[in-house]
Amino acid sequence: MIVAVLNGPLGFFLDPFGLRFFLYGLLAAVLAVGGGAVLGPVSMLRQEAYLTQGVGQSMVAGAAIGSILGVPTMLASFAAAMGAAALVHLVGRARFAASSSAVAVVSSVLFAIGIAVISADRERGVNVSNVLFGNILGVSEADLIVLAGAVSIAVVFVLRNGRMLMLAALDEQVAHVHGVRVRALDLLRLGITSLVVAASVQVVGVSLVVVALAVPYLVVAPWTRSLGGLVGLSCAAGAGIGAIGMYLSYYADIPSGPAIVIVAGSVFVVSRFLGMVRR
């Protein structure tokens, strides 16, 4: 009886756990998509849907320059992510361009610099593919620890400053009146977003970080109006998307990054359809 159950629906979920790479990949996907979703509501309200993707693209420059200077890839990529976030903040605050335009300009220039450096020195062998698309099936324990630490910092930051972040995102002038230090808080948020992106891109690539930011929020926003519900449900939706995507990758024998993106898109369509039916 037990064998029959294990070979049925329960076996479908448990069989992949016999492979360590799947277990590590599953944990990484849940952390990256579910944990990254905690920053989604504020970023989406600020119309920064592509902030994470832009910061992730900028990391190519960090990885390339770091390889020349002998700096570890993770450290160099994080420094590039922080630099890109700071430049986006400065360009936006200086009124040189709108926030979305600042992301596009900064990320494109830094990405181009990275590609140029790599092309000029091919012998160093910087793996651009891992930065762009991730290597979730090659996740190590160290990668998981770094990712879990970055996500934990983001969760604590949002729990402590969530209401101020939302108020500043909706109306900066009103936030100033209520004593919110908008610029300092926004710069800190960009720094923490860069930390999460730097940790996530090593695992899931640039193609997935924007999914973690945007899709969970878009899925749950029509179903809740409270800040706690918005953040909590976004994280739960992100974690579910990451887990289902990993199972799809395993059984359909397709790369895990695209599988998670496909699941995210499907969940978004179903959520919108259910919302239309409810209305």
Image: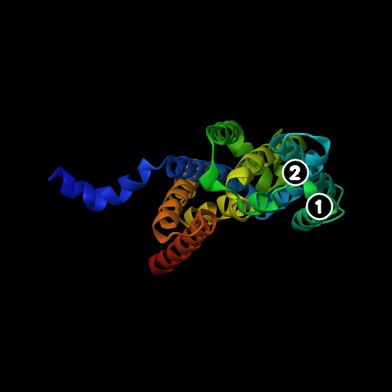
Residue 42 in the figure: left or right of residue 271: right
1 or 2: tag closer to the N-terminus? 2
Vertical position of residue 79 compared to residue 279: above or below = above
The colouring scheme, among rainbow, by chain, secondary structure or one colour, is rainbow
Q: Which of the two discs, 1 and 2, sits closer to the camera?
A: 2
Q: Secondary structure at mark 1?
A: helix
Instruction: Give neighbour class at mark 1: few <14, some 14-19, many 20+ (Cα, 10 Å).
Output: many
Number of numbered labels in the structure image: 2
Front residue of this view, candidates 45 and 270: 270
Vertical position of residue 85 compared to residue 248: above or below = above
Spot occupied by residue 212 in the image (x, y as percentages of width and height): 56, 50
Q: Amino acid at mark 2?
A: Ala
Spot occupied by residue 239 in the image (x, y as percentages of width and height): 46, 46
**Can residue 90 be seen by looking at this rendering?**
yes
Q: Which residue is mark 2?
A: 63
Instruction: Please give the name of the residue rendered at 59% of the width and 38% of the height, measured from the top-left corner.
Output: 163
Q: Which residue is mark 1?
A: 106
Front residue of this view, candidates 149 and 163: 149
Q: Amino acid at mark 1?
A: Val
Task: Say which mark, if any, is on residue 148.
Answer: none
